[in-house]
Image (spheres, coloured by chain):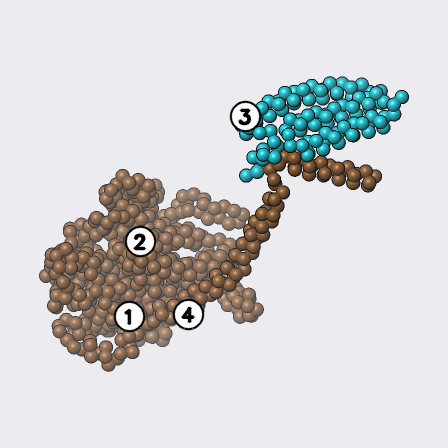
Chain colours: A brown, B cyan
Amino acid sequence: MLPYLLIPLLPLSGFLIVGLLWPYFRGKGHWITVPLVALSCFLSIRAFMDTLNGPPLHYVVYNWIHSGHFSASISIMIDHLTAAMLVMVTLVSTLVHLYTVGYMKDDSGYDRFFSYISLFTFSMIMLLISDNLLELFFSWEGVGFCSYILIVHWYERRPSWLAANKAFIMNRIGDFGFLLGIFLTYTVFGTLDYSGIFQQIPAHLNDQILPFSAFHSQTSASVITVIALLLFVGAVGKSAQIPLHPWLPDAMEGPTPISALIHAATMVTAGIFMIARLSPIYNASHTALLVVGWTGAVTAFVAATIALTQRDIKKIVAYSTMSQLGYMVMACGVGAYGAGIFHLLTHGFFKALLFLAAGSVIHSLGGEQDIFRMGGLSKYMKLTFVTMLLGSLALSGIPPFAGYYSKDLILTEAFKDGSLGHVFWAIGVTTAILTAFYTFRLIFMVFTGKENFSHDGHHGHAPHESPLVMTIPLMVLAVGAVFAGWAGEHYDIIGYLSQSMTVPHFSGSPAIPDDSLKLISVIAAVVGIATAFLFYGRPSSIPLALSRTFRPLFELSQNKWYFDEIYDAVFTRPMIFLSFILWREVDKGVIDMVVNGVASSCQSMGASLRRFQTGQLQNYALVMALGLFGMVSIFLFMK
Amino acid sequence: MVPLSWYVALSSTLFLIGLVGVLIRRNIVIVLLCIEIMLNAVNINFVAFSKYQHVIDGQIFVFFVITVAAAEVAVGLGIIIALFRLRETINIDEINILKL
């Protein structure tokens, strides 16, 4: 058991050593953190091997809180779901650690950065191996904090801390719902342990609750539904689903390794992991599944449409991440948790790859992020080009790359889920066309065609291939992007995962055989790529003409469906206005006046009283004598 | 025999003279002397009440008062000399350093 305890503890000790002794490292922080995380990854793979033909591991490390009937422990639970996630998380984390050595070279916060990504890895591992909701929430907040502190790594830059604040505040909204969900869970079930909750679900299936009783409303709802939806609010915030998504694209202000590790492969998938982990709760509520499914489908589609017109290379990949997260949430919504997690795993590989490759491009162009100022880079950086192409093929869903298997599984499972499933399937296929289009728009704009960058923009030399320490992670991830999907299907990862998740039965049977569905997805991807080639693969006036013809649609997409503007008008500005009024009228007018009034009246009273203090001893003695005289006379007369 | 009230009247008069002297005189030596007068006014009271009530305690207490008065004069005069050296005055109005 002890070796598996080390899986979270190694990154934690890496954080503590580098974080506490940072002045002694001076740019050597990776010598500590990289081996520790790599070792943690090795142990994770061993744990994964153990679960292949053994029971899940469950071990209580210590009793954290014990108060009355409430108890929560810090435990390690490595079942099939956790083990598969652990391998992906620690592997990507190790590769990103390695990549960071090259990418963040000469950065003033080099060692700080390493200690924080180790802390993040620790929190993420704790999130995965928790066996109760409190431990989950604790690490849930931990990863959120690490995300904040890593986005704001370049804290002198205004966009960085604006983005970090945005991410933190939006996640706080989600976490508030999550926390309410945990409270309600404890109130209803009396325990926060997963197994304890799951055992009691059948007993509470028909319980009702009045969620709006505070407003004297008699609307009642199923308690399981309310719990599931409240917990889902947390997932919406963490996994950047509409309407709590705008923080994710903004979070791209952080360094690229962070975008790859936190905002693509691991942290943002915590929401999907949570839904899959608590699948019995969601299975018990049809309404909640419906909400989950629709949120995912809408997010997948909206994010894909936004990605079509963005110019920033990282923003495109970020919206693509959001879209893919939408797929996974949609999969959970139709009860296909296994497919969702499978897509999560493959996506972790190819999206981390895309981000790291994008980082490599940015690195070689000296910080340029606008794809319209790139072009023709394939002859300068062949390795980056090839790996990014593989990642893009995987993302688009071209067989036999990873994305094909997992995305296709989601679409097939959605199609089997009755008539609503058909709608989800249609949205998914449409999104798949868009995905292939924007992905290859990026590839064509960046790597082919005319060179639109200036040769003297970055230290006066031509773009160059990144150092080996950055390209090796790319190559390893590319292997994952190529083979992960095939391996997952070949070794029946769905069967493996379903050992720790209950999957609801499907009511309908597919009217169209699986093969035709697969063919349709592939055709969708090919259509998208072909269109991208037509538009951007060679000099063409079609994009410009289209953007003129469909100007409102184009602007809707380019302005990200005006989410930021709407939030600004509905929440931010009224809030600032209200705060301003409260500050001027209440704070300055009432509170300050009372406080200042008390102070100044004390002062004026003191000023008049100080006249009595002459410093003449005889005056004091006179007053004393008069007082004594007065007291004695009162005493005598009273008597 | 002289009635007790006469003693009390004498003592009160002496005490009042002393008190008024302490309060109005500006010369610090006179103030010290007036304090001595007040102490002796008290001594008269002690002795008178001791005699009339046939309790010896009062007379014993007078010795203590005289001792304290002697010590006080010694210390007081010392302070006055030190003060005079410091401020070159024995006018009590000019010695108001208690006030900022």
Chain at tag 4: A
Using the image, tell me which numbered label, if any, was put on residue B85.
3
Task: Tell me the quarter of the image containing the N terminus of chain A.
Answer: top left
Tell me, yes or no, whether the two marked residues, 1 and 4, touch with CB atoms within 8 Å: no
Between tags 1 and 4, which lies in front? 4
Instruction: Give how far apart the Cα atoms at labels 1 and 4 are.
Output: 21 Å
Task: Tell me the quarter of the image containing the C terminus of chain A.
Answer: top right
Q: Examine the rendered structure and indicate whether residue B51 appears above or below residue B100.
A: above
Q: Are marks 3 and 4 on the same chain?
A: no
Closest to the observer, A435 or A316: A316
Q: Which residue is mark 4?
A: A570
Between tags 3 and 4, which lies in front? 3
Q: Are marks 1 and 2 on the same chain?
A: yes
Instruction: Give how far apart the Cα atoms at labels 1 and 2 are.
Output: 28 Å
Please state which amino acid type lies under the numbered disc 1: Ile
Residue A509, given in percent of the width and then of the height, sits at 33, 72
Name which residue lies at 10% across and 61% down: A379
Q: Are marks 4 and 2 on the same chain?
A: yes
Q: Examine the rendered structure and indicate whether residue A513 appears above or below residue B20.
A: below
Chain at tag 1: A
